[in-house]
Image: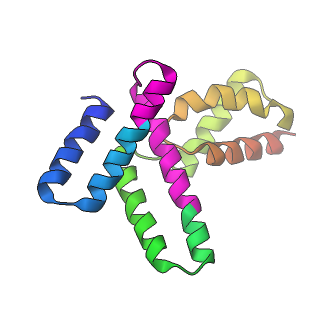
Amino acid sequence: MSLKETIEANLKAAMKAGADDRKRVLRLILAAAKLAEVEKGSGLDDSGLLGIIQKEVKIRRESIEGAQHAQREDLVAASLAEIAILEELLPKQMSDEELLALAVKTADEVGATALTDTGKVMKALMPKVQGRAAGDKVSLIVRQVLQNRA
């Protein structure tokens, strides 16, 4: 079962259960996927859909920061609930230790020795962690690995 089919099945279940927040979030993902398909001119695969879900999680996290700054706890709670729904659709996230080990291995594979090789390592590493780690977290760990080598 593809990720899109899973989302559609979850949407049907949410409609039957009357879970309005869940319905809204799942419809948002399907609408964003449809928009991406139209822009791309072809269907999305699971990795493209995972990218959309990760982008939505990132947007929610940024809105939490703004809501906390504005002292709007109601918006913080709503965004956290939406993130929980979105994260159910994502694969299990990698731990920092797993990510560090994979970053070291990838840096060895591409022969990275200095901080200037960050792009090479990221290019090789991102497909390996697609959907299981956020890009900013991966970038931070890669930079730490390369700084330790310099």
Q: State the predominant SS element of the stretch in magenta.
A: helix
- Name the residue at 41% across, 25% down: 44
The colour mode here is rainbow
Q: In the rendered image, which quarter is residue 70 located in?
A: bottom right
Can residue 49 be seen at all in this image of the molecule?
no
Furthest residue to the top? Answer: 42
| Quarter of the image that includes the C terminus | top right
In this rendering, position of residue 61 left or right of residue 122: left
Q: How many marks?
A: 0
Give percent across and percent down for residue 131.
48, 38
Residue at 40 percent across and 51 percent down: it is: 87
Question: Whole-percent x and y of residue 14?
Answer: 19, 53
For residue 30: magenta?
no
In the rendered structure, the answer to whether residue 91 lies left or right of residue 133 reads left
The location of residue 16, given as percent across then percent down, is 12, 53
Say whether residue 110 is visible: yes
User: Left or right: 150 with respect to 130?
Assistant: right
Looking at the image, residue 10 lies above or below residue 85: above
Picture layout, residue 39 above or below residue 30: above
* Magenta-highlighted residues: 33-62
Say whether residue 56 is magenta.
yes
Quarter of the image where the N terminus is located: top left
